[in-house]
Amino acid sequence: MSLFIGLMSGTSLDGIDAALVEIREGDAPRLVATHDTPMPETLRDQLWGLCHADRLAFRELAAAEDAFCRLQAAAVEALIASSGVEREAISAIGSHGQTIEHAPRGHDGGPAYTLQLDNPSLLAELTGRSVVADFRRRDLAAGGQAAPLAPAFHEALFRTPGEWRLVLNLGGFANLTLLPPAEDERAPLGFDTGPANALLDAWHARHRGGRFDAGGAWAASGRVDEALLERLLAEPFFHLPPPRSTGRELFHLDWLQGHLQGGEAPQDVQATLAELTAASVALGVEMGRERLDAPPAAVLVPCGGGARNPDLLSRLARRLPETPLLPGEDWGWPAEWLEAGAFAWLAWRRLAGLPGNLPSVTGAAGPRVLGGVYAS
């Protein structure tokens, strides 16, 4: 039995999720303890500025990286204290870092790249534990999209004999995993379906303030603008075959603004954005089923922050009437902790010398051992 900590900060920039995971060879990973450390507003503003900067000074990057790493260390310390686990019992920390930009196809003919702000050397120094980090670029080097990486973890948790399953992560962006039955020789399929909370949060912040639309209440008060939805769904990304991944480089408020005609009620735009997430997920499910010649899945497991949004879940249920939505809690994994858990599991894979990617998901040339090790 080994204990690993996984750290995740998503595109919502709302905090550091820290998950303590027990891993036994041959068994599904078990969630032991969790801690959420909120992102200070000043750091959030710094990181947000980096995500949208055309030019920046290295000192700005270094300052944000240092503050982010120290917040990660604080999250680790709080998790250790609350769990009661001895520090020496923790084999390693898996740190995703903070994605600043993700361009797996490059820009304007340039090389593919993905940038996660992180300082694993400092994190190892501050916590006294070895750190595994920089998970994405090895897959990118092998010709993959470097995302999504969580489907390999979804397979370890949820693939089972006798039934097809779907796992849907509703973070800033939505990614979908299609899991064939365990006895089926076909590999899982996974890809980004489009925006989830990123546009919803940004539109809400612009018109109502605050970081997010709690429970989807504002979206539920609006009416879906079908003409706007049709224009949004015409975006070519939604119709690309997998492998595919995306981020704020494509889906941002300026992209949305380019599809508005003026005069739309803000709450109707919010409702339409929520419907866009549901509709693009449904398109992804249809695309995946066609690719794998699969029947309707027996269950869909929603995870990520959007899994706590009743309005969004009801829209998904209407779009996917053949597949019941069942929470990850039924398998011992609350919705918001799967991604942090994934990076604990990926750290274990790295130390064991085992591949962490799924070429059927990312499009990489083959299985690759992901991440670099920074000894304590």
Image: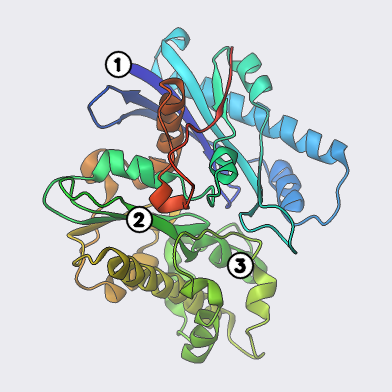
- Left or right: 37 in relation to 350: right
Q: How many residues crowd around disc 1 within 10 Å: few (fewer than 14), some, or many (20 or more)?
A: few
Amino acid type of the residue that numbered disc 3 sits on in the rendered structure: Phe
**Among numbered discs 1 and 3, the one appearing first in the sequence:** 1
Split into 4 quadrants, where in the image is the N terminus?
top left
Depth check, mark 1 against mark 2: the one in front is 2
- Counting from the top left corner in percent of width and height, residue 363 is at 47, 53
Q: Residue at x 73, y 62 (%)?
A: 109
**Disc 2 and disc 3: Cα gap in Å?**
23 Å
Callout 1: SS: loop
**Disc 1 and disc 2: Cα gap in Å?**
29 Å
**Among numbered discs 2 and 3, the one appearing first in the sequence:** 2
Amino acid type of the residue that numbered disc 2 sits on in the rendered structure: Leu
Q: Residue at x 22, y 73 (%)?
A: 321
Q: How many marks?
A: 3
The answer to whether mark 1 and mark 3 are in CB contact below 8 A is no
**Among numbered discs 1 and 2, the one appearing first in the sequence:** 1
- Residue 107 is marked as none
- Left or right: 118 in relation to 83: right
Residue toward you, 286 or 303: 286
Q: Which residue is mark 3?
A: 251
- Counting from the top left corner in percent of width and height, residue 352 is at 40, 21
Depth check, mark 2 against mark 3: the one in front is 2
